[in-house]
Amino acid sequence: MTKVTLKDVAREAGVGTATVERVVNDRGGVRPETVERVFLAVRKLDYRHKMPDAHRGLIRVEVILVRPETSFYSRMNQAFERIAALLDKSINVHRTFVRENDPVDFAHYIANPAVRRSALIVVAPDHPDVVKSLRAAARQGTPVVQIMTRPAPELPYVGIDNYAAGRTAAYYMSRMLFGQSGSFVALCHSGAYENHKERIRGFSSYLADYAGEHLFRQVMFDYDDDLNSMELLRGALRDDPEIIGLYTAGGDNRSVAAVLKDHASRRIFWVGHELSDQSRRALRSGIMSIVLDQAPEIQARRSIDLTLRSLGLIDVEVSPEPVRFLTITPENL
């Protein structure tokens, strides 16, 4: 193999050889953005030179998550933490939690990071300002990976097929309740996330495709708030004695379990998302029928791999297929 030279690295990084020499020998006086370009060129070309310890954490991958108090995002956050501990010391995975209920502020943070970032992995609300800021970051050369939800369809995405998840929920519900006439209802966080909208759309489309004795009555938006969930579900069960199926398209199920426990005699068939302590208990008690878990640990690993490949730090192929969601019942907990 031809030996890689400083000139090769300089050509790849788009800088002069003197700049490369300053970076690899830690002589200082080079802008951080330029140091990063040189570092990436060194890694891509496998230049046989040990980079200085001063460049530890030079490649900063920012992960923007929401709602750290929920079990799902807690699992995802812990997964990123474990992965970060195993990466090369030159790569820093920084996790940030941003308020989802202020999309303008969310968009502003994407466009104006507190510190320089090399790449961005983000759970992004489906809001015009947020989508605009994601596209702007990508145009400026920052690799952007959307995780869990995909408001900007042209940008890379790692997550499950949410439309298929919704159809799967309807498939199980309608098949398991075959021969029983009645209505189905759904609870959803809101229209703020594309993944939730896709799940509801899939659920509705399956029931429309296989119209029978089950009527999809309504979608209730609870914003993952326990009091809202309880009030909406209690009202629906009070007003419609024909409800026999419930689909929760969000991930926090504690309040739903409490309401259905109070109405246990009605034997509502409940399909929800995310395996948590609450959903485990609900499954074991017979209140919940099926959980569709979207494996946040796999999403975290694949999104990091896709980001590192975009930066030229690894050359292995990263699967473009949706992450497979898991079907959990009381029998395979």
Image: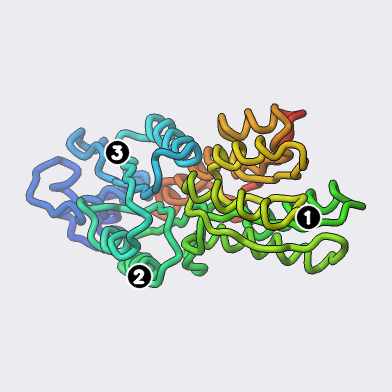
Q: Nearer the viewer, residue 318 or 183?
A: 183
Could you say where residue 285 lies in the image, as x and y percent from the top left? 70, 28
- Disc nearer the start of the sequence (3/2): 3
Q: Nearer the viewer, mark 1 or mark 2?
A: 1
Report the amino acid beneath label 2.
Asp
The residue depicted at 30 percent of the width and 68 percent of the height is 140
Residue type, label 1? Glu
**Tag on residue 129?**
2
Q: How far is mark 1 from mark 2, CA to CA?
A: 41 Å
Give the mark nearer the N terminus: 1 vs 2: 2
User: At 40% from the left edge and 72% from the top edge, which residue is drawn?
Assistant: 128
Q: Which mark is residue 297?
A: none
Task: Using the numbered discs, state the Cα–Cα distance from disc 3 to disc 1 in whole angstroms.
Answer: 59 Å
Residue that badge 1 annotates: 242
Residue at image position (61%, 49%) is: 234
Sequence-wise, the earlier of marks 3 and 1 is 3
Quarter location, residue 83: top left
